[in-house]
Image (cartoon, rainbow, N blue to C red):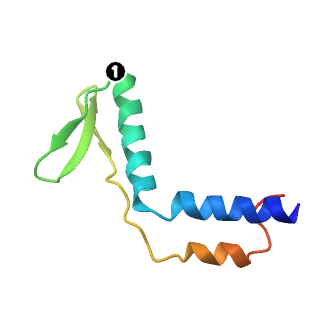
Amino acid sequence: MEKLIEIVKIEFIKTYLTESFLDKFHLRNLQCISDNGYTIENDEILKVDYIKIKRTKIYIPNKPLLGNLDLNQILDSKYIIT
């Protein structure tokens, strides 16, 4: 079980350590919105995407920025899977 926990920790770190994860996650959500029949428009002034539902603009959050969390600390954590 110890080896499995180590592998899960390493793969978790590799998955979330790069900014490409956030890019893919954000693009996947935009694609999901489009796939459900909504047209994504851009507000040039606010520099944010939105969809319209019954004349109401619903703003789509921009991709979040990476913070300074050191994901490598997960290697020392006691819990990640149970």
* 37 lies above or below 15: above
Q: Position of residue 67 (x, y in %)?
A: 43, 72
| Quadrant containing the N terminus in the rendered view | bottom right
**Most foreground residue, 10 or 54:** 10
Q: Tag 1, which secondary structure?
A: loop
**Most foreground residue, 41 or 80:** 80
Left or right of residue 44: residue 24: right
Residue linked to disc 1: 37
Left or right of residue 56: residue 17: right
Residue at 25% over, 33% down: 40
| Quadrant containing the C terminus in the rendered view | bottom right
Q: Position of residue 57 (x, y in %)?
A: 25, 38
Q: Position of residue 60 (x, y in %)?
A: 32, 45
* 62 lies above or below 10: above
**Most foreground residue, 22 or 20:** 20
Q: Residues within 10 Å of mark 1 (few under 14, many from 20)?
A: few
Q: Amino acid at mark 1?
A: Gly
* Residue 12 lies in quadrant: bottom right
Left or right of residue 33: residue 54: left
For the view shown, which residue lies furthest in the left direction?
45
Residue at 38% over, 24% down: 35
* 77 lies above or below 55: below
Residue at 53% over, 60% down: 16
